[in-house]
Structures are given as C-alpha cells and as structure tokens.
Image (spheres, rainbow, N blue to C red):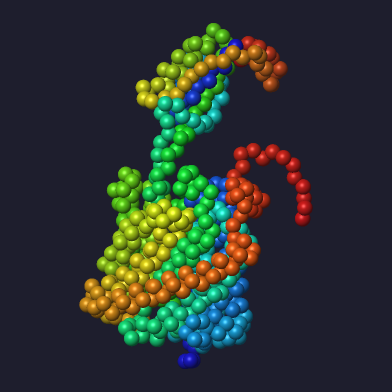
Amino acid sequence: MKLVCAVIQPHRLDDVKSALEAAGVRGMTVSEASGYGRQRGHTEVYRGAEYTVDLVPKVRIEVLVGDEDAASVTSVIVGAAQSGKIGDGKVWTVPVDDVARVRTGEHGPDAL
Amino acid sequence: MDEFVLDTGNTAWIIVASSLVLLMTPGLAFFYGGMVRGKSVLNMMMMSFGAMALIGPIWLLYGYSGAFGSDVGGIIGNPFEFFGSNTITDADSLMAGSGVPALVAIAFQATFAIITVALISGSVADRMKFSAWLAFAAIWVTIVYVPMAHMVWGGGLLGGDGITSGLSTPIDFAGGTVVHINAGVAGLVMAILLGKRKGFGKEPMRPHNLPFVMLGAALLWFGWFGFNAGSEFAADGTAGRAWVNTTVATCMAILGWLATEKVRDGKATSLGAASGAVAGLVAITPAAASVDTYGAIAIGTIAGILCAMAVSLKYKFGYDDSLDVVGVHLVGGLTGTVLIGFFANVSDTTNGTWYADGSVNGLFYGGGVTQLLTQIIVALAAVVFSGVVTFIIGSALKATMGIRVTDEVEASGDMAMHGETAYESLGVGRMEVKA
C-alpha cells in the first residue's frame, strides 16, 4: 500500500478532486497548508508598509491506495493540478505498513 | 441663566446622538482589534471597553463639572460645582439654549470623553500593561481631556475669549482639537515612552482580520453622525449640514486614500478604504457645520491623501505608533482644524452653516488670514498642552507602576495578559468551576 501526498495550488482542489473521483478514488484527506518552493513568497502592502510573506497558502491532499494504483493516481493528480506555472506544487508517494478501518476493524488492502 | 424651556425634539435627538457616539467605542474596538495580530486582539478590544467602564463614572462624578463648570483660570471648570451630577439644574445645562436637559448634555459629553481616551489605545498596542492602561486612562481624562474640553468648549483659553480674542473665535464644531489632536498627540507621546513592539519594522505585523476593520469603520461612520450632527445640540438645518458634510468628506477621503495607494503601492486596499473613511471623519469633525459642500469635499480629499502619506512617518522617525493614531487622528485633526482657516463659510447661513460668535470667513471665502491664524494658534496650543501633560503622566506611571509588559507577556499576548485566547482550534482539556 502507498500513501500518495500532494501539495497543490488551492484553486486546483476542485479539479483534482473531480479527476480523482473519475479515476475511481473513493476517499481522500484534504488540509490547508502553507509553504513555498521555487515560487518563494509574495508581498502584501498594509498602510504603505510592504511585507514579504514567505509562506504561501497551499492545499495538501492525501490518498491511500494499493501499490498497483499509486502511479496512476499520481499522474491523475499531476494532470489535474498542472498549470505550467511556478508554484504548482509536488506529488510524492510513501510506503504504508498497515491500514485499519476503524468501523469494522479490517486490516491491510481490505481496509482501503 | 435664562429660564429653561424643554424642547422635546432636540432632546430626543441628543439622546439618540449620545447613543450613536457611545457605539463608536465598540466600533473602534473592532477597527483596532482587526488591525493587530490575532494573539492580542482581545487586549486591543479590552482597552476600548476598559475606557468605557472607567470614563463613564468619572464623567458623572466630576468630569462634566470639570469641563463645563464655572471657569477656573481659563484652564478648567470647577469639578466640585456639579459633583455627582445630582444637583445640576436644566437651566445650567450646556444645551439650555436648545431646550435639552442637563443630564442629556452630560450623557452626550460623556461619550466624547470615552472615545477620545479609547483612540489613544491604537498607539500602545500589544505592549502596555492593562493595569497601567486603566491608570493612564483615568488620570489622562482628568488632567488632559477635561481641561482641553473646558478650554475649547467651556469658555476657557482656547475659546472665543481666550488667547485668540485679538483675532477671531476659533472654530471646533465637534472636536478637532479636543478629541483628535488631543488623542493623536497623546498617542505619539505614549508610543515613544513605551518603545517599539518586539520586531517592529522587521517582522510582518499583518492585520489579522480585515473584515473586523471594515466593520469597525462602518460602525464609526454611523456613530459619527451623532458626534458631528449631534454637536449642533439641536435637530435643525445645521445638524443636516453637519450630516451631509460628514458624509461627503468621508466619501472623498476614501477616494483620496485609495488613489494615493494606487499610485504609490499599485493596489487600492480594504485597509486603505477603512482608514480613509476614518481620516475623512476626523478631518471634517471640527469643520462639520462651518463649511459648505465644496469645503467639505476639499477637506475630505486633502485629509485622505495627507493621512495616507502620514502613516509611513513612523518608519522614517522610528516610533511605533502601532495603529497610526498619529497618522490618522493627529494629522487628520490638524488638517481639518487648519483647513477651516481656508474654507470657513460662516457668513452665509442660508445653507445651514454654523458660526461661533466672533469667527470669520476663511481665506478662500473672502475673510483674509484672520481665521487661519486663529485656527493654527489653537491647534498648536492643543498640541503643546496635550503633549506636555501626557508626557508627565506617562513618565510618572513608567517610573512607578511600570507601563510595559515583559517580553514573554508581549510574545504571548491575550493568553498572558487576560488569561484568554480569541480563537481556538481544538477544545481539548478539562474544566473546573471556580466561582
């Protein structure tokens, strides 16, 4: 099993979610995040004082998938989140030892 | 005093106007509260609520009497004359000529004292001990606000028979000197005595809730109708003149501030709109009923542009006037007070304008420089009086009880100062009933 993690532009969340649903993904966890990569921060001006804000708002998506689906889910996210501009984000996968479904107590791939 | 004849219409309006002005202080709490970081929003708002709680009783006990009682040396009224506000008769009322009873006049003036003190809190954000703030508020209203109100409105040195009696009568319709220059100078002095917030000029100190700032500005604007139109002490055409001038100047100041930002920073901001509104309200306050529509448009526009530029002075001079009490209230108050000398139109009363006996037209309305000189003199006198006495109060408090919180408390904010936090993400823990 794998955990696919993606940090994307917040306004791309709807597109990514729809694309994942269309690809058969039945659940995900979404959280608000902040950070920066090559995009760096941006500036805001309050009463003439310019502030450089290093951390930019992002959305983090986590999807648990079977080993065989990790590559396709990654490409679905990349396809839906891509605008070609700096700041589009990153997608990565990490191995998962075990998963349990809280309602039934099932373990492993059955719990996905 | 003449015999008192009750005017129910005027009285009804002044009761409503008093309530409107009282609403400005919680409005100010939102205006200021949204502008600070989320860690200290409650302390910011508590300084306004603390001012309300303290100044109300002070005003009823001796504040009104000190401002509007019998003159003592041109500086202050006799604070014991109407002590307790129980024995004052309606014929002694500040508003007797309008048929408004004494207690209603006291109520109206109380709300002015409260908001003036609360305005200063914007300069001391994040770092003043709450106990020191309350002590400062009580002492400041007693020996700065009360004498200033007396000198300008109670027949003292800054009124018609005062230091400018050789020139003309100063015009301060609703509080350009008493409220805004006064609070602005006091804010500057306290910001310097307290020192800068940790990280000032280095860390971003972003307003944590701009919708609060907009809400606060809207409440201030609404309440300001009581402030300016109520200062006529009557429900009549002059109150109408004050109302329309207040609105048109505020509209123009928003446009002036936003245009300045657009040119300088590239974007017109919501904080700029809210700040411009307050700058316009401040500047038109002394002039509200003494200029015509064109004068109000000019004063609002100039104030919006000047105040938008003045808010960056603190970075140049290195004082941390956190929420720009100087840039908005001192500069706006000076702007309005001095521009009266150009735009006063007191000879043509057909358009509802008001004049103090002995005041003359401004420079642009054929009156020469007489009124301009008068206005500059009273503005400078207000700056000096407020600056000197506030410095004495602040220095005394600093030397005795201390005015600044420790670095740890400053970093923590509301949690350390009031034992509360404004916002929580997870309510995990236990509770214990103590009361």
**On the rendered structure, is B430 left or right of B155?**
right
Total marks shown come to 0
Outermost residue toward the bottom in this view: B2
| Residue at x-position 45% and y-position 24% | A89
Q: Position of residue B276 (x, y in %)?
A: 37, 56
Residue in the foreground of this view, choosing between B168 and B279 = B168
User: Does residue B387 appear in the picture of this structure?
Assistant: yes
Q: Horizontally, is B404 left or right of B292 in the view?
A: right
Task: Answer with left or right where residue B431 lies relative to residue B245.
Answer: right
Q: Residue at x 40, y 39 (%)?
A: A43
Quadrant holding the C terminus of chain B: bottom right
Q: In the image, residue B148 lies at what x, y percent?
A: 48, 76
Q: Which of the two residues, B337 or B427, is positioned nearer the viewer here?
A: B337
The residue most toward the front is B399
Name the image quarter holding residue A62: top right
- Residue B91 vs B215, above or below: the answer is below
Residue positioned 48% across, 15% down in the render: A74
From this viewpoint, is residue B357 visible? no
Q: Residue at x 40, y 50 (%)?
A: A47
| Coordinates of residue B53 in the picture (x, y in percent) | 61, 66
Q: Where does the image place residue B150, in percent across and percent down from the top left?
A: 48, 80
Left or right, residue B65 beside residue B361: right
Q: Is residue A39 above or below residue A69?
A: below
